[in-house]
Amino acid sequence: MKSLKYIFMAAATCFALTACFDGDDSLFNNDWTEPTLGEAPFGNNAITEDGVITIAELKAHPTYKSAIANSGNILVEDDIKLRLRVGGNDVGGNLYKQFSAQDATGGVIVAVNQGGLNGYLAEGQEIIIALKGLYVGGYGNQLEIGAPYNGQIGRMSKDIWNDHVKLVGDIDPSAIVPLDFTTIENDIDTYSGMVVTLKNVTFKSANGKKTLVDGTQSGSNYYHQQIDGYSSSKLIVRTSSYADFAATVLPFNEETGQKIPCNITGVASRYRDTWQILIRKASDIEPLQ
């Protein structure tokens, strides 16, 4: 009898699966709807472009200017938005739970308590951020969007972020054209947070052995490397020990005993009056020899 019982059970299962494959899903919840093509699967597609301002206008706004300048935070109560392109993300592990975005007037760091942001925020992805209900502030005078943290600005929850961002247009990495650092280095207030390239430079401590994280330690996981021609109070390259490229040896020619010049591209964030270049991925260091 047991064998007969199992035969009937197998037959019933087969019948149910066949019915489902034929289009009858009565054995399941009948609430599935086909996704609408053209809508991004992440973010809030109901966000409109009404009230879009520039980063320069946000930083100059009297309500938010003081919080940014004094490393504080303030809740945005105005119905304003930013339309930006992603400049740098966490693809290489050097930007942790944050990404940079920019328009023609400046850049911003957006802090989100979520890993793998690069999965939907690729370099060149255009986004609209609805600022109302989020916090704007400064971390070492660097404009950031996030949530309050110890009187400053920190990461917002992923659910809050998802409700305040809309992905628009196609991903266009070519739309992020790195600025020549020498043309903007004396205007940190305007250009911090944007992608730049340091052209034809050498690492001060390059000797064929030292890596990006053999420099001066800052905090528990970050290390600073200096660039020849710049003091450490003016400019440093900042790298996390968790970055995929942390063990990259600083460009050096052991045969000639000379440092190898290179182009270094990255997000030019700031800490007060010091530029902090955040390399996004290994290819951001381009040896010229």
Image: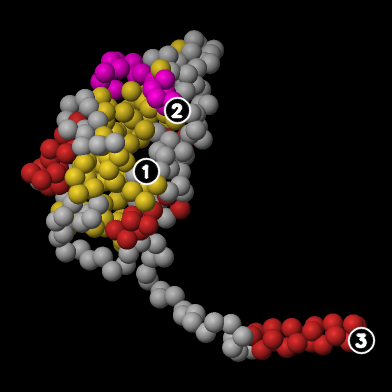
Range of residues picked out in magenta: 217-235
Who's the residue at 40% across and 43% down the image? 97
> Across the whole image, how many numbered discs are drawn on residues?
3
Q: Which residue is mark 2?
A: 221
Q: Earlier in the sequence, mark 2 or mark 1?
A: 1
Q: Which residue is mark 1?
A: 98
Where does residue 37 sit, x and y in percent of width and height? Answer: 41, 74
Is there any visible trace of residue 59 in the rendered image?
A: yes
The majority secondary structure of the magenta stretch comes to loop
Where does residue 176 sit, x and y in percent of width and height? Answer: 31, 46
Is 62 placed left or right of 283 in the picture? left
Is there any visible trace of residue 288 in the rendered image?
A: no
Local SS, label 1: strand
Q: Amino acid at mark 1?
A: Gln
Residue 138 against residue 119 in the figure, above or below: above
* Residue at the far front in the pictured view: 1
Where does residue 169 sit, x and y in percent of width and height? Answer: 32, 62
Q: Which residue is mark 3?
A: 1
Closer to us: mark 3 or mark 2? 3
Q: Amino acid at mark 2?
A: Asn
